[in-house]
Image: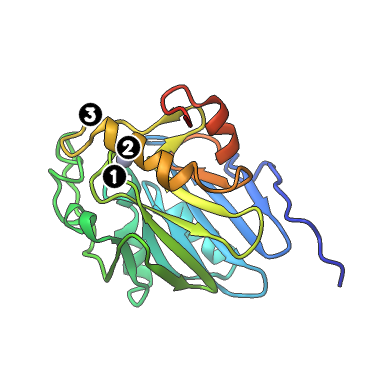
């Protein structure tokens, strides 16, 4: 079989979300209407298990997608514990109780603390189920056929992690609210800090190959090279 190059296809999926497909990976982005938060479902061709990254509001749409594609989540990964990234954990755990819920070790308390996960501040206190596993900088977390390197990048949220998949070029990373296309995560929350975030972006993201695709928690995906050249908030030098 001729090996096709990894493709990056922006097409309209049923929710108007972009959909990336390549020879190995199928990646769907489901944008929740509240907070415009990106939830991701990633699976490897030929497998019926998948990763769900940052299930936010409207988890019923994620479940519908999984059912349509006959997928079972092998892990629920949270980049950090803010409510818009964790609001769907409960519905997924209810449907698939055996599926591990995974978050950075320094962030796990936010899952079960409405003040810390900011839901109380927004006026609708919510809790997620607790973490089944926690990860730390340098760990490799494996699920659904993916081996994901964990990198801790604090500054938006103290225990924020990113998940990096290096099996094929370009590499891809789920970066939550660390960086966005042309922007960066807010640093005005109680455990936020701009200098910490900028240092983390420079050492943990800008050191990746330029073609690494960054799947961000809000807005369109971007690449390391694009942000190194054009991000006005964190310059590469
Ligand atoms: Zn956040």
Q: Which residue is mark 1?
A: 154
Residue sitting at 26 percent across and 50 percent down?
81
- Please report whichever mark, 1 or 3, sits nearer to the chain's N-terminal start: 1
Vertical placement of residue 181 versus 214, above or below: above
Depth check, mark 2 against mark 3: the one in front is 2
Q: Which secondary structure lies at badge 1?
A: loop
Residue 44, position in %: x, y? 62, 68
Drawn side of residue 48 relative to residue 177, left or right: right
Point out the tag, 2 or 1, that comes first from the N-terminus: 1
From the image, tell me which residue sits under label 2.
197
Task: Count residues near mark 2 (Cα–Cα under 10 Å), then give few for <14, some for 14-19, many for 20+.
Answer: many
Report the residue marked by disc 3.
188
Q: Position of residue 58 (x, y in %)?
A: 40, 48
Tally of numbered tags? 3
Under circle 2, the secondary element is helix
Identify the residue at horizontal 42%, vertical 39% (top origin). 202
Whether residue 102 can be seen here: yes
Res 223 visible: no
- Asked if residue 154 lies left or right of residue 211, the reply is left
Whichever of callouts 2 and 3 sits on the residue coming sooner in the sequence is 3
Q: Is residue 29 left or right of residue 128?
A: right
Q: Residue at x 58, y 65 (%)?
A: 43
Disc 1 vs disc 3: Cβ atoms closer than 8 Å? no
Distance between mark 1 and mark 3 Cα atoms = 13 Å
């Amino acid at each position: 079989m001729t090996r096709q190059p990894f493709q990056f296809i922006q097409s309209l999926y049923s929710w108007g979300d972009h959909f990336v497909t390549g020879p190995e990976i199928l990646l769907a982005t489901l944008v929740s209407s509240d907070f415009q938060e990106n939830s991701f479902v990633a699976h490897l061709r030929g497998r019926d298990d998948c990763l769900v990254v940052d299930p936010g509001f409207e988890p019923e749409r994620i479940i519908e997608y999984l059912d349509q594609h006959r997928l079972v989540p092998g892990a629920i990964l949270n980049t950090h514990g803010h409510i818009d990234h964790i609001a769907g954990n409960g519905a997924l755990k209810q449907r698939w109780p055996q599926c591990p819920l995974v978050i950075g070790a320094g962030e796990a308390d936010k899952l079960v603390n409405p003040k810390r996960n900011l839901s109380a501040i927004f006026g609708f206190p919510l809790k997620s189920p607790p973490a089944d596993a926690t990860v730390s900088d340098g760990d490799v977390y494996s699920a659904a056929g993916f081996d994901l390197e964990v990198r801790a990048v604090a500054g938006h949220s103290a225990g924020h992690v990113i998940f990096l998949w290096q099996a094929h070029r370009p590499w891809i990373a789920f970066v939550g609210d660390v960086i966005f296309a042309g922007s960066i995560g807010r640093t005005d929350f109680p455990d936020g800090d701009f200098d910490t975030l900028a240092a983390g972006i420079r050492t943990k993201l800008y050191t990746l190959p330029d073609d690494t695709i960054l799947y961000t928690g809000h807005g369109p995906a971007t690449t390391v090279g694009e942000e190194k050249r054009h991000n006005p908030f964190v310059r590469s030098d």
